[in-house]
């Protein structure tokens, strides 16, 4: 009897302790699903599948078979058909290694769209939203799968914004977005119409990204092993760009600079994916949620508390609001300053989240050394030249 290797896991089948197999992103999506947070459903193609692909230079048929099985389950959960002509299920395809590699791995959003089912999305939503989603897909597929520089897409977008007399992306109307799509399709001439071919090409491209020059250099600089591979997470899309009742954001469960036990982050209304950290619009502070969506703010605070209780540490998370509903797309242990590390460790002991022994292990000797160096007095009267978050999570999921 031949025992087939399991290469694909639904989020319901995984857990946080499967990081080596499912990657950090996949294992955390599984963990958040298991504790009942509102995570869009999906599945993870394992790091073993990645290493097999890199070794054999092709994706074994059994991996594709397992992906098709999980896609059927996802279609049943969502009540949609992947790439269907009437109510298309669109997905995000995102990489995630066992060790966090911010900015190194790749993402494709809105995968499953094509010229044929675009009309169905327009019927279900509206023309501007549909073309906005389509141009994002073409852009990301072109970059990740075809290797076309992002600057090429930006040039085309800027030309059309100038032609239409608008400065911001959100001010471009449906006709303008349609023109952007046509310009992008001239850049990426060979996107498959078949959604399944789109998915397989994107999966292979993400696996291949593990060995690209950028990722190898990052691992060398950070003393990370080269034999881990990356997982691929395929997740039902939720949309932060459906209008002013939607948005996308990133947040820390505590302030990463000071350690204060207060949510810290930014968000944008009517935005998707990396818009929050791309610098194309000025994000709103997370406190502004209280005025715009007070119920969402309260729910997000509750989510932050649940995540800290589950992971016993400060978390860095990504979220999308679609038509007033909050979805959690990612969480990971949050980076912090040395001063913040000490305060968070101390406070979590006081709050009975961790023990003193764990707190001592949380603060590294290098962080203590940095605290002992001369620093700017936090009470000093200084002029700020900038503010906001560092480029963070990936925010490219919704």
Image: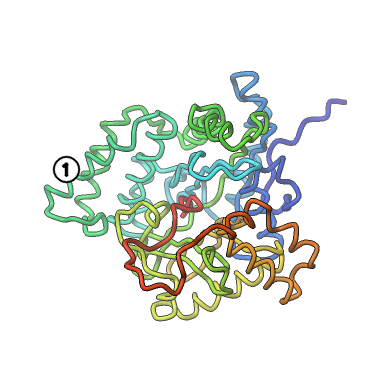
Numbered-mark total: 1
Seen from this angle, which residue lies furthest front?
Answer: 374
SS type, badge 1: helix
Farthest residue toward the right? 1
Horizontal side, residue 228 vs residue 161: left or right: right
Left or right side of 198 for 347: right
Check the picture and name the quadrant holding the N terminus: top right
Q: Residue beneath label 1, please? A: 159
Residue density around tag 1, few if under 14, some if 14–19, many if 20 or more, within 10 Å: few
Q: Seen in the image, is 132 located left or right of residue 49?
A: left
Residue toward you, 9 or 209:
209
The answer to whether 29 is drawn above or below residue 203 in the figure is below
Q: Position of residue 146 (x, y in %)?
A: 40, 28
Name the quadrant containing residue 260: bottom right
Of residue 79 and residue 55, the one placed in the foreground of this image is 55
Q: Is residue 156 above or below residue 364?
A: above
- Residue 299, located in which quarter of the rendered image? bottom right
Q: Residue at x 40, y 75 (%)?
A: 288
Q: What residue do we see at 40% from left, 34% from top?
A: 193
Residue 322 left/right relative to 24: left
- Image coordinates of residue 46 in percent, x first then y, are 67, 38
Colouring scheme, one of rainbow, by chain, secondary structure, one colour: rainbow
Residue 291's spot in the image, x, y percent? 40, 81
Q: Residue at x 79, y 67 (%)?
A: 356
- Which residue extends farthest top? 56
Find residue 88 and report its horizontal and vertical position in percent: 46, 49
């Amino acid at each position: 009897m031949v025992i087939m290797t399991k290469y694909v896991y639904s989020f319901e089948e995984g857990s946080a302790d499967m990081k080596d197999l499912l990657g950090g992103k996949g294992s955390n999506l599984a963990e958040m699903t298991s504790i009942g947070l509102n995570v869009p459903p999906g599945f993870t193609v394992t790091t073993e599948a990645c290493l097999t692909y890199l070794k054999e230079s092709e994706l074994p048929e059994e991996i594709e078979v397992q992906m098709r099985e999980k896609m059927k389950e996802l279609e049943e959960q969502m009540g949609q058909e992947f790439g269907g002509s009437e109510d298309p299920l669109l997905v995000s395809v995102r990489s995630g290694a066992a060790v966090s590699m911010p900015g190194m791995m790749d993402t494709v959003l809105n995968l499953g769209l094509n010229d044929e089912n675009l009309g169905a999305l327009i019927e279900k939503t509206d023309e501007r939203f549909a073309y906005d989603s389509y141009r994002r897909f073409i852009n990301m597929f072109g970059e990740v799968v075809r290797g076309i520089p992002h600057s090429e897409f930006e040039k085309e977008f800027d030309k059309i914004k100038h032609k239409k007399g608008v400065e911001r992306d959100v001010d471009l109307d449906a006709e303008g977005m349609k023109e952007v799509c046509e310009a992008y399709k001239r850049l990426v001439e060979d996107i498959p119409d078949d959604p399944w071919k789109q998915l397989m090409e994107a999966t292979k491209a993400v696996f291949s990204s593990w060995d690209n020059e950028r990722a190898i250099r990052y691992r060398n600089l950070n003393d990370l092993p080269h034999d881990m591979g990356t997982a691929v997470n395929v997740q039902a899309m939720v949309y932060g760009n459906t209008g002013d009742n939607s948005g996308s954001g990133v947040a820390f469960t505590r302030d990463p600079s000071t350690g204060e036990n207060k949510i810290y982050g930014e968000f944008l209304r009517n935005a998707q994916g990396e818009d929050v950290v791309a610098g194309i619009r000025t994000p709103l502070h997370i406190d502004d949620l209280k005025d715009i969506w007070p119920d969402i703010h309260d729910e997000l605070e509750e989510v932050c508390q649940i995540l800290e209780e589950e992971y016993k540490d400060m978390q860095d998370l990504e979220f999308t609001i679609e038509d007033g509903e909050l979805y959690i797309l990612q969480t990971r242990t949050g980076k912090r300053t040395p001063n913040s590390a000490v305060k968070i460790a101390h406070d979590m002991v006081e709050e009975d989240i961790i023990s003193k022994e764990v707190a001592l292990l949380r603060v590294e000797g290098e962080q203590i050394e940095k605290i002992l160096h001369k620093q700017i007095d936090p009470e000093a009267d200084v002029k700020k030249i900038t503010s906001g978050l560092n480029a963070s999570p990936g925010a490219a999921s919704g």
